Image: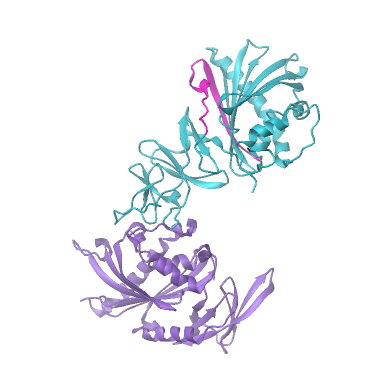
Amino acid sequence: MTMFNTVIPRGWYFISYLKKLNRKKQIEFSYFGGRLTLITKTLKASLNYLVDNTIIRNHSLPTLLYKDMIFVYYSEHGNPSTKEEELSLINKLISIQHFDHRTTSTYCTKVPTSLFNLSENIVDSAHFPIVHSHLSSLEIEDFITEPYSFVLKIKLITSRILLFISPMSLDIKFTSMSIGTGFFAVYSRMIEWECITFLTPINHSTTQIVLYGNLHKMFFFPKFLNPLFNIFFVTTFGRTILQDINIWKKREITHQPVLSTADGPIMKFRNWYSKFI
Amino acid sequence: MTTIKSVDFNKIPKGWFVIGKSSLIKKGNVKTIHYFDQEFVIYRGKNREITILTPHCVHLGAHLGDGVIVNNCLRCPFHGWEYNSQGQVIKIPFTNTIPRRARKKTLPNKEINGFIFVYFTHDNEPPIPFPIVSFLNQPHWKYSHVRESIIDASIYSISENLGDKAHFPVVHDTFVSHAQLDSFITEENNNLKAKLSVSTKKGFCWRAQNIEITLKTLGGISAAISQFHLFSFPSTSVHALIFITPIDSTSLLMTKIVAVENKKNNFLNFLYNFITSRVIWQTIIEDSSIWEKRIVLDHPVLSSDDGPIIPLRKWMAQFYPLKK
């Protein structure tokens, strides 16, 4: 259990949009505790671990291009991705209905915490009303795990301040879907908003978060206000994640946590997550 | 039975330790402290009661040092679980069911005479009797000098000084010409009492003196009180109380209190306090360079001139954990 915070789980991770990269160059990124070198022309990726500017280990990583997005498969021992894992990624990406990055609002940040802390947060419903005071409560209605993904159905009861609606609060139902440990899509039919979250480990204690939000319709509001609402939702979502950082910094992952009936499906999530480490 | 060979003198012994003055923690505050080679969270409830507990929440491991005080309980910043002064979770938001395992280890503590005492042990055995330092609340004793310092030494090195008479004329040669251990006995409550005669050099005062010092440990090896008579001036009794608290295996907090018999004259009280504190502090500085680099040998080669090092070790062994 203590490995959760120290091991980067294997799986597909988002690296960048291809159009944002110079196609004639070899580009270096800091990911997975080493230097990830990507040749954009051939989409070949290799991961080098350097000590005093000397390469001590090097292995190539499988890559995948989907709708201009570059994904890399990371495994600690350089094992290749199985066909099943690859298909799972592609099928899930296809299943996201309104997936169109050109109309999104983006939020990108690096957070000093492990991928595990970020991932577990989504099923940890009990901390929302304590840490994130702008939310009233969050209920998990369903949590279904599959070999490479999970589906989580959430009911979020917003506080009055969040949406400026008085005197009522608002219940919004979200569905969150993961692909491996590095990708979450959160969408709500009610407000027709979708947020895609890419989590890519820079090392075992730092993670890059990229959020892409799409808003299609916001109740009765005119469509030209959508970009404004979208920016508001994405930055609120991003800031919500950042509110946890102080707790994660000093947190100790306990081997056998004492859980209460008010907790979300923590152990079910941990069992699912442990398959990737 | 615990023997010298079976115990690990490099570890932290059990006992009552002073972790600071009462002003260390204010009402309604939470702090993280580092003692005994580990972190603890200390908080003072609205009822002024102090609680010291291990730092991570039993639930999902958040650090309780960032928690807040609610009704004399410490509330975890992550999920709002509330711990009472016994370390038990008494409230979990959105549920009335509290898991049986929902409790944390707390350290027994007492707050006496403006100092916070904590009982530390490696196992769960009940605390040894709390040391009662009578002079601290007696009006005929005047104590004004309290000094806290961090010293790079193990608690063992300092404690062994009690019986090591041979080092006095060598390390403390600025004012000691000869030291003799007159008696060395174990008293009630397992405290150790030693009587030491120290001959000072002529240059130390205007004439050489012979000072009789009675040293006594209090509740383990973490506290020792020494009593002696000041000479040359109008005769007065002096008490010097030293508390040592391990921060980790190589450094410790030393709290030194000097009390003199109240002369009803503030100048004289100050003078005696000042001189005695300076002398004691000088001896600590002289010893500390040795303590810093010394190692504890399992089988030291001893001479006939040495003090009761082995009986002292035998007595100290009861406070140390066994070797693994």
What is the quadrant of residue B278 in the picture? top right
- Whether residue B50 is visible here, answered yes or no, is yes
Extreme residue in the left direction? A167
- Name the residue located 37 percent from the left edge and 79 percent from the top edge: A104
Say whether residue B131 is magenta. Answer: yes
| Chain B palette colour | cyan
Colouring of the image = by chain
The answer to whether one can see residue A69 in this image is no
Residue found farthest to the bottom: A42
Camera-side residue of B167 and A102? B167
Q: Percent position (x, y) of residue B204?
A: 73, 19
Q: How far from the left and from the top, in percent, is residue B61?
A: 45, 56
Q: What is the display colour for chain A?
A: purple
- The span picked out in magenta is B128-152
Horizontal side of residue B64 vs B273, given as left or right: left
Q: Which residue does the image show at 38% across and 40% down from the upper left?
A: B45
Query: Residue B81: within the magenta?
Result: no
Relative to A29, say whether B250 is above or below: above
Picture quarter containing residue B252?
top right
Tally of numbered tags: 0
* Nearer-the-camera pick, A71 or A254: A254
Residue at image coords 79%, 33%:
B302
Whole-percent x, y for residue A233 in the image: 33, 70
Identify the residue at image location x=37%, y=84%: A100
Question: Is residue A146 shown above or below B181?
Answer: below
Taking the view exactly as shown, the residue that stands out farthest to the front is: B1
Q: Position of residue B179 (x, y in %)?
A: 75, 22
